[in-house]
Structure formats: C-alpha cells, structure tokens
Image: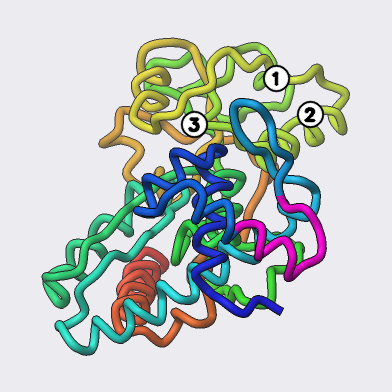
Amino acid sequence: MIRNADRLRHFLAVAREGNLNAAAKQLGLSQPALTKHIRKLEDEFGVELFTRHPRGMTLTQFGDRLLRHAKLIEAELRFAEAEIRSVQSGHAGVLRVGAGPFWGVTLVPQAVARLQKDFPELRIELEVGVNTITHPKLFRGDLDVVFSAGPDGQDLPPFVVFHDLLHVPMRICAGRRHPLAMARRVTAMDLTRYPWVEYQDDPDTSSRLQALLREQKCPAPRLAVRATSLLAVVHLLKAGPYLACLAGPLLSSASELGLTVLPFRQEIRSYASGALCHRSLAEMAPVRSLIGYLADGAARMKTG
C-alpha cells in the first residue's frame, strides 16, 4: 500500500520527464532526495518501476500500470481541491473540456460563454477533436468532461458517466458547385467518383462508409485530404470536387457555409451523443451547469 501521496507525485514527475534531473528541478528537490523517494516507492510495491539508462529513465511494465492509476489519483485529488476552492472563492480554478467536431463548433462555445457569466473566476481549457483523441484523455484524467459521440457499445470505465443529449446522423456533403449538388438522387457508385476529405482521423465514420460501399459492390472511396481543422474542410469542399461526411445538425446551416447535403438515401452512421464526465465531478456546480446548458442547446436543435 502507498503510504505517502507525495511519492506518487514524484513518480508522475519522473514518468513525464523521463529524467531525474529535470523531474527534481520541477519538484524543487535535489536529485538524491528524489532518487530516494522513487526507491522507497519501488520497495513498497516490491518491483522496479523504472529502467535506468545513462541518459534517462523509462517505465517498466509495472511502472506503466501504476502510471494509469496514478494519473487518476492525481486527478481525483485535483478535483477535490478544486471543489473546496470553488466553495471558498466562488468557483475559481480550471475546467478542462473536450468536444467532438460537431459540439466544438456549435453548442459548446455558446455554453462556455454562458458558464463564464455565472462563474467569472473559472478558466476553461477547451480541446476539440474526435473520440480517438478526447476519450483516452478523459479516461486518463487529462480532461474533466467531454461532449462527443457516446461509447458506441463499448463499456465505459466505472468512474465515467454518460449523459445522452442528442441523436446525431452523419450526412454526405459537398460544395454548392459540386457536380452532384443538383442531383435528385446520389448513388453509392457516385460517391466513388470523387475525392474525399476527412476531418482528423475518424475511423468510425470511414469504416462505416467503406462497409456500405462494399455491400453495394463499389470500390473504396479515395481519401485525398485529412485535415485537422473543420474550417479547412469547409473551404476544401467549396474549392474543389470533394465529398465529406459531417454531422447532420452541423449542416442545418449548410447553405450559410456554402455547402449542400447530398440526397444519398442510405444512412452512413448515426449515434447517441452527449456528455461524458468523471462521476466525482458530475455534481460540481460548473460541470452540472455546463451539461445543463448543452442539454438546453441540444433540445432547441431538436425542435429547430
């Protein structure tokens, strides 16, 4: 059993820096003192947590397993501290928010602005990305709440809860001057004749699209561009004969974006979308308020 919480903090510093000197400077300790703390932690577990190299240290298989738990323990301590300080100072501190592509450019910015009117001392760190980026960060404790597609049949860690807020269908879109823009009906074969743009690395959508085309005996779509900016995707669609698959609610204002939704009758993918957060944070006032604001926005989008 770990008898000293500071040793976990020391362990995390060495794991992140990969070097005793750098970690000691970060912690304000001498290198011999830090070495002693790491040795004591290894003695408590009865295993070596690091492999020592001439120029640094790397985690052993035991250290790698401890790292996952240590990050969560660190996050829980930070959450506890933030909750206490929030009561003392009117909800000051930092809330780290992740958002999927749809949420990040539609409802989340509005909700964040609304949240900071209620909690002006609260700082928000916002990261927009697909599930493969934001979910691991949430599970490691590097993000506090994520608004995105749900777990899609996968089991969530027991410390994470999901609030279903909105059903999101994916739609195929193109620029208004695209050859298919005026078509009354778009076929699966039509989709293979033009280059595709993908926003970030979205294996869920791309694999569903490829499976659908295989069922129709069509070749795989040709991925021409993968962009990390949703704005860049929109401009690419307007500039060339590209196709893309984007969230349906985002395209409710397709004409304003200079895009058009193509009349492809088969569903590519649809999913439950909402908020994932640590159970220990769910009842903190800023988190509860932020989820509530997003639920309000999602309800308006459903009826709009």
Label 2 with label 1: CB-CB less than 8 Å: yes
Tell me the tag on residue 173: 3
Q: Residue at x 45, y 16 (%)?
A: 178
**Element on which disc 2 rests:** helix
Where is residue 89 shown, x and y percent of the image?
Answer: 15, 83
Q: Position of residue 240 (x, y in %)?
A: 43, 10
Q: Amino acid at mark 2?
A: Leu
**Which residue is found at the position 54% from the left and 73% from the top?**
164
Residue closer to the observer: 220 or 52: 52
First in sequence, mark 3 or 1: give its number. 3
Mark 2 crowdedness (10 Å alpha carbons): few <14, some 14-19, many ≥20? many
Residue lying at 16% horizontally and 68% vertically, measured from the top left:
116
Q: With respect to residue 231, does 133 lie above or below? A: below
Position of residue 101 relative to residue 1, above or below, is: above
- Provide the residue designation for mark 1: 221
Along the polypeptide, which appears first: circle 2 or circle 1? 2
User: Mark 3 Cα within 10 Å, few/some/many (few <14, many 20+)?
Assistant: many
- Label drawn at residue 148: none
Amino acid type indicated by mark 3: Cys
Q: Is residue 221 left or right of residue 301?
A: right
Bounds of the magenta span?
38-49
Q: CA distance from mark 3 to mark 1?
A: 14 Å
Q: Secondary structure at mark 3?
A: strand
Front residue of 44/103: it is 44
Location of residue 210 by image quarter: top right
